[in-house]
Image (cartoon, rainbow, N blue to C red):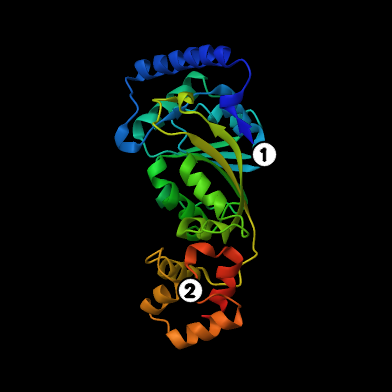
Amino acid sequence: MRSIGSTKGLKNLTKFFEIIKNMIEDIFKKFKIKAKKSLGQNFLVDDSILKYIADYLDLENKNIVEVGPGYGALTQKLLDNSPKSLTLVELDKDMVSILEKRIEDGDLNAGNVNFKINNVDVLKYFPLIKNYSVIANIPYYITSPILRHFLYEVENKPANMIILMQKDVGDKILLGQDNNKRYTSSVLSLFVAKKTKVIEIASVPKESFIPSPKIESSVLFFEKHNLYDDIPDKKFLKIIKIGFLSPRKKLIKNLNKGGFNKSELLKIFSELGMDENIRGEILGINDWCNLIKKL
């Protein structure tokens, strides 16, 4: 994992950040645009981490969907990697205008890439392409809905995703990836673990953004797997929600409250070698899936 905060020559990086920030502020002044708190906008301006994200995957001749491109700081770096197509999904009409103007002025050069901008809410965006990657710098307050959207709701699901998110949310997701740890699971970590293997590829300090958020950030890489495809998604999501109705209560009590027969639950728990006093947060993804198959 890369940590920008521990990079040598931090003073030089700080000076570099200031130069980049001044350049961005010039762009904002030109278009009379400010970051909108209502949209949770924090623009990543650290050139080294932007390049790291763009170069992490082999993008040549691949289909890419960039969510939340803003003014296009990452966009050109993605284009430089010669993808087959690059589709931008941006809700803010003002940012779309900036992107279109930068393309018109030659600030963004798409070259031979099949390039498209969609001015749409990402939760209403359903990709038509079947083999693609998602790269996203998203408002932190919609991290969970966006993950659910791409992992469960779209018909054509991405092969992998790189997502910049709030560090504590990323940590919660990562804990759910380790089936040997205790007291780690949550609805979020489980619905992610059912569909993807996740690793943290970079940590990003708040000073790397304009405006600076109050929290640290992480960049996570999600890779699709099909280990639990034999369990219907609707059934899986319904049962884990029931299991966490009261996270600190016994799992059997939550499941019984959610409509499952207690005697049958005790029998299933015994068959699986599970403690009847266990709480849902203690179970990892494998244990949860084994339980759900019997319910």
Along the line of sight, which residue is nearer the eye, 294 or 164? 294
| 145 over 30 or under it: above or below | below
| 228 over 138 or under it: above or below | below
Along the line of sight, which residue is nearer the eye, 258 or 276? 276
Spatial CA distance of label 2 from label 1 is 44 Å
At x 63%, y 18%, the residue is: 8
Q: Which mark is residue 57?
A: 1
In contact (CB < 8 Å): disc 2 and disc 1: no
At x 47%, y 33%, the residue is: 216
| N-terminal label among 2 and 1 | 1
At x 57%, y 63%, the residue is: 284
Location of residue 222 in the rendering, given as x and y in whole percent from the top left corner: 59, 49
In the displayed structure, does residue 56 sit left or right of residue 234? right
At x 48%, y 19%, the residue is: 105
Please identify the quadrant where the N terminus is shown: top right
Classify mark 1: helix, strand or loop.
Answer: loop
Classify mark 2: helix, strand or loop.
Answer: loop
Dot 1 alpha-carbon crowd within 10 angstroms: few under 14, some 14 to 19, many 20 or more? some
Task: Say which quarter of the image contains residue 41.
Answer: top left
Q: Which residue is mark 2?
A: 277
Q: Nearer the viewer, mark 2 or mark 1?
A: 2
Location of residue 31 in the rendering, given as x and y in whole percent from the top left corner: 35, 20
Dot 2 alpha-carbon crowd within 10 angstroms: few under 14, some 14 to 19, many 20 or more? few
